[in-house]
Image: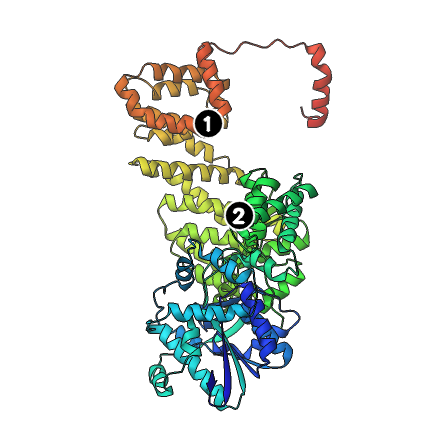
């Protein structure tokens, strides 16, 4: 096709297709154009040169966003097997000018998105007798990589688009592409190569409509101010639709097809064997040879030019994994999709917050990776402490690079995180840039904004987050808000919900070098003790459950504070008339564990007397037994009381309390339920435990050893 004096070659491709990428590269080397136009936002012309930087490593994406409104953004992702990326790389390497020719992002971000369009690949595959479009495209293009396939695709797309009238954004995009081609021809370019999605090829390769028609269509488009940059991307994100084209289901496989110099099936199955060996699974060279034979045989039987992903996956399943789907899933996750994370050079335009984070990552030797991994931190080490603070600060900013993992034990010097850098976190960083130019100052400003919360529990939780993030400048304002809110808040439940976070924050003081919060905690606890009684009256079932959880939290906090008046406050309300059964049972258990009650069997018997409502008795039991059933295993008197109560229920009452009983006993560990059942079945529930005779002479050696371990006080 010619436009003016320019010869224009339109190369229709499939986004992220390795066969298309090879074909485009070969055709560009044959054409040797003096201008390459690539489908993408023209605002990115200013940063396209960065693709030649040695530190640029795909997968990466162009990001266009509205400054100050990061939620209005769009991505254009590229892998090394993307035809557009190969076109850009060829042009920059050959010293040829390269531009983007799609509708400007300033307009696309201002317009409403069109509904999804038809799938031409599926239509062509159906016409060829294939029920799987991916398989059809693999056979036609990806397994061939011949330049001639571009002509075949062009002919097929022309047939599919026959009679199609583009509308909405699609019509605007194609009009702008034609405008860009005409402008390039007027500038004097002689050979122009246009790389675009195959669907658009008929609109650009045939006789172009009058320029005035396109200009009329593009006149008066709404626009917004946009900024563009490059951001890292991942293979996993390529597996989802995004930017200008649909995603691909198997980016890892496509990357392999593009990079493999020869024998792609043999190389793929060899890599799969290595992945399985890393999992300590026995996979030999003989397994690989048999898997290759099976994949090739399946391809021949199915009439395919080369074994595709379905064939090699079946060979992996049958030969390398012995039919184990968990092993197949490992190959799927690590190879077929993969989580390769790209990299952009330091000269890429960034907001100051992004650049500060990059410096922090370098200083703390905390490399962002696309594949999830666990990081175990020892907060006694300065390096790990710095990493912890960075992750907590990012969490405050809404950039969840790390997800906390519960750590066993009660120590405060260990943390575990699951780290996974996702491309959308770069956008979240841009959004957080409104709060500051460094991670620390931005997190401090964000805390000041969050401290406007009207809920006291949110504020005390914010104190804890400030401490673990080490934001001393933010603490005074939050503590001032807490004092003011606590002084005005007369609702005991709010105080009870707020206390645990404050006390947990105190535990980090020694390890993290932060000040304690004892004064505020003691004040809150004193007000909770004073108002506990009235707060327990008139509770329905839902409120009783909420109050039980609050009591547990305050009890734990009081223990950490070493407060000895809290058990007395609980004892003053235990067994009181009108107390919900769930709350009464839980308070009784807490006092029993603390050694403050010696009449628990009598209290249980009164709560389960036949004169009381069965539902209250079941709720009392649930509160008392929450946390485990070993108490019933080791205390025959309590088990006898429960057993007598259950066997004495009428059928109607038993049906009424059955859901509560199932919830209570279902929470016990299987071993605990089994031991309780054995005791009841053997009749030992009614018999007190037999005293165990002890041979003091035989035990003397063990006693001396234990006393030496425990110290002289024992």
Near-viewer residue (521 or 171): 171
Q: Callout 1 environment at 10 Å: few (<14), some (14 to 19), or many (20+)? A: some
Near-viewer residue (401 or 440): 401
Left or right relative to 655: residue 331: right
Q: Quadrant of the C terminus?
A: top right
Coordinates of residue 152 in the picture (x, y in percent): 48, 68
Tell me which numbered mark, 1 or 2, is placed earlier along the sequence: 2
Whether residue 548 is visible to the viewer of this picture, yes or no, is: yes
Q: Quadrant of residue 124?
A: bottom left
Q: CA distance from mark 1 to mark 2?
A: 56 Å
Coordinates of residue 201 in the picture (x, y in percent): 44, 74
Asked if 77 appears above or below 392 in the picture, the reply is below
Coordinates of residue 101 in the picture (x, y in percent): 47, 78
The residue depicted at 42 percent of the width and 14 percent of the height is: 640
Q: Quadrant of residue 542?
A: top left
Asked if 466 appears above or below 297 in the picture, the reply is below
Q: Secondary structure at mark 2?
A: helix
Tell me the residue that label 2 is attached to: 301
The residue depicted at 72 percent of the width and 20 percent of the height is: 704
């Amino acid at each position: 096709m010619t436009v003016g004096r320019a010869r224009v070659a339109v190369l229709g491709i499939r986004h992220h297709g390795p066969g298309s990428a090879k074909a485009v590269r070969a055709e560009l080397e044959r054409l040797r154009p003096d201008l390459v136009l690539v489908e993408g936002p023209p605002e990115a012309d200013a940063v396209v040169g960065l693709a030649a930087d040695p530190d640029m490593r795909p997968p990466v994406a162009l990001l266009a966003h509205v400054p100050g409104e990061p939620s209005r953004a769009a991505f254009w992702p590229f892998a090394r097997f993307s035809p557009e990326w190969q076109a850009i790389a060829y042009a920059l390497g050959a010293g040829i000018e390269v531009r983007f020719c799609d509708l400007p992002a300033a307009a696309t971000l201002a317009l409403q998105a069109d509904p999804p369009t038809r799938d031409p690949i599926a239509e062509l595959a159906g016409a060829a007798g294939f029920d799987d479009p991916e398989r059809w495209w693999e056979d036609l293009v990806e397994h061939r990589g011949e330049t001639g396939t571009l002509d075949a695709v062009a002919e097929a797309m022309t047939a599919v688009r026959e009679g199609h009238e583009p509308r909405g954004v699609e019509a605007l995009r194609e009009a702008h592409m034609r405008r860009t081609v005409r402008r390039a021809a007027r500038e004097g370019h002689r050979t122009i190569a246009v790389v675009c999605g195959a669907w658009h090829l008929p609109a650009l390769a045939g006789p172009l409509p009058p320029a005035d028609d396109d200009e009329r269509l593009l006149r008066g488009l709404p626009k917004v101010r946009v900024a563009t940059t490059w951001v890292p991307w991942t293979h996993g994100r390529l597996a989802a639709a995004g930017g200008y084209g649909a995603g691909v289901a198997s980016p890892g496989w496509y990357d392999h097809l593009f990079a493999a110099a020869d024998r792609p099936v043999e190389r793929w199955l060899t890599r799969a064997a290595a992945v399985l060996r890393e999992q300590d699974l026995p996979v030999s060279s003989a397994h690989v040879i048999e898997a290759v034979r099976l994949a090739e045989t399946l391809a021949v039987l199915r009439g395919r030019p080369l074994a595709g992903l379905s064939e090699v996956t079946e060979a992996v399943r049958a030969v390398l994994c012995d039919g184990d789907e968990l092993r197949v899933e490992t190959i799927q996750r690590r190879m077929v999709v993969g989580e390769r994370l790209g990299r952009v050079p330091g000269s890429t335009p960034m907001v100051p917050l992004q650049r500060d984070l990059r410096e922090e990552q370098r200083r703390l030797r905390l490399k962002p990776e696309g594949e999830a991994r666990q990081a175990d931190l020892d907060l006694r080490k300065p390096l790990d402490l710095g990493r912890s603070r960075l992750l907590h600060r990012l969490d405050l900013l809404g950039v969840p690079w790390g997800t906390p993992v519960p750590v066993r034990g009660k120590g405060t010097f260990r943390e575990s995180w699951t780290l996974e850098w996702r491309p959308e976190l770069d956008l979240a960083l841009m959004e957080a840039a409104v709060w500051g130019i460094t991670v620390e100052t931005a997190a401090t400003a964000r805390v000041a904004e969050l401290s406007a919360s009207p809920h006291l529990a949110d504020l005390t939780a914010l104190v804890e987050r400030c401490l673990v993030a080490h934001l001393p400048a933010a603490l005074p304002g939050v503590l001032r808000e807490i004092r003011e809110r606590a002084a005005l808040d007369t609702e005991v439940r709010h105080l009870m919900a707020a206390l645990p976070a404050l006390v947990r924050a105190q535990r980090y003081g020694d390890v993290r070098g932060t000040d304690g919060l004892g004064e505020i905690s003691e004040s809150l606890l004193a007000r909770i003790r004073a108002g506990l009684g009235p707060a327990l009256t008139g509770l329905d079932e839902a409120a009783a459950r909420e109050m039980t959880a609050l009591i547990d939290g305050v009890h734990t906090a009081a223990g950490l504070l070493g407060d000895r008046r809290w058990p007395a406050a609980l004892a003053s309300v235990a067994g009181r008339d009108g107390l919900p059964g769930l709350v009464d049972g839980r308070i009784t258990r807490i006092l029993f564990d603390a050694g403050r009650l010696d009449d628990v069997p009598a209290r249980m018997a009164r709560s389960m007397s036949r004169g009381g409502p069965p539902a209250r008795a079941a709720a009392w039991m649930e509160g008392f037994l929450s946390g485990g059933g070993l108490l019933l295993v080791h205390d025959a008197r309590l088990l006898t009381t429960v057993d007598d109560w259950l066997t004495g229920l009428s059928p109607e009452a038993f049906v009424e309390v059955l859901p509560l009983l199932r919830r209570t006993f279902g929470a016990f560990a299987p071993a605990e339920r089994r031991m309780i059942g054995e005791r009841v079945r053997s009749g030992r529930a009614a018999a007190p435990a037999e005293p165990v005779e002890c041979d003091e002479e035989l035990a003397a050696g063990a006693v001396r050893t234990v006393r030496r371990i425990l110290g002289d006080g024992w």
